[in-house]
Amino acid sequence: MGAVTMLTADELRARLQAVGEAKYHHRHPFHERMHRGELTRGQLQAWALNRYYYQSRIPIKDALVLAKSDDPAFRRAWRKRIVDHDGDESGYGGVEKWIQLAEAAGVPREDTIAYKGVLPAVIFSVDAYLSLVRDSSLLVAVASSLTELFSRQLISLRMDRMKLHYPYLEPGLAYFVGRLTQAPEDAAFALDYVTKHARNREEQEQVIRALERKCEILWAQLDAIEHAYVVPGLPPPGCFLPKGEA
Ligand SMILES: O=C(O)c1cc(C(=O)O)c2c(n1)C(=O)C(=O)c1cc(C(=O)O)[nH]c1-2
């Protein structure tokens, strides 16, 4: 790869953008059904409960990222993400807000916190995100968060459609309100970081590959939820069963 020329910052951004447009989970059939208003309350419960496993691992993932850096300025910037999810003395954070979203869908708080009936394939895909971050360079670990470049638009559409089609979720939407400002800030920081710190074409390709892997990790979670609760609708033994639809 030594002879291959580096991408300019604009070219790198264009490549990342193309990955997101093609592979980000805004295109997943489960999200498309959600946005069309076709999901039952039980299917939304399954989604909220399973997504809680992802939410719960994000601050742990960010602690793994922090542990890779010996730069206080980087750590100061990155630790904001842990505070966003866990909260601080001024109040609670995104993890608690997600529990409230699941409650609005109808999942009891204690079931969410206990990860009761989370799908095995969701656990495996989320854990693959932690492994990717734990076992990779700081550059790849930062790059794997770049799906956040695409999350604001999805979350904003999701909020609109939830208000329209699933009004009972409205008391639980605070999580998404927070993400509308947090996600673009976090994505801008990560994009700037990878642009400056990928020192050659090989590292730039690693950055692009990390974004692809992360898109696959997000996609696989929704595949698992779709398979268990939509078509064919086969929850594995011991997994969450929507009330009244079992
Ligand atoms: O609801 C979504 O579609 C969505 C997507 C993503 C993402 O793109 O990874 C994140 C989130 N939400 C999110 O809420 C969140 O806190 C978050 C953190 C990260 C990350 O990789 O560090 N991604 C995401």
Image: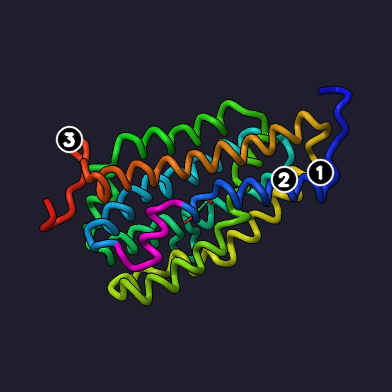
Q: Position of residue 170 (x, y in %)?
A: 35, 74
- Per the model, the C-alpha gap separating discs 1 and 2 is 16 Å
Query: Residue 31 magenta-drawn?
Result: yes
Foreground tag (2 vs 3): 2
Asked if ligand 1 lies within 8 A of label 1, the reply is no
Residue occupied by mark 2: 15
Residue type highlighted by circle 2: Arg
Q: Which residues are magenta?
A: 28-38
Query: Which numbered circle lies on residue 196?
Result: 1
Q: Position of residue 99 (x, y in %)?
A: 33, 58
Residue at horizontal 34 percent and vertical 35 percent from the top: 121
Foreground tag (3 vs 1): 3
Residue at horizontal 69 percent and vertical 46 percent from the top: 16
> Tag 1 or tag 3, which sits nearer the N-term?
1
Are the residues at dot 1 and dot 2 in contact (C-beta closer than 8 Å)?
no
Under circle 2, the secondary element is helix
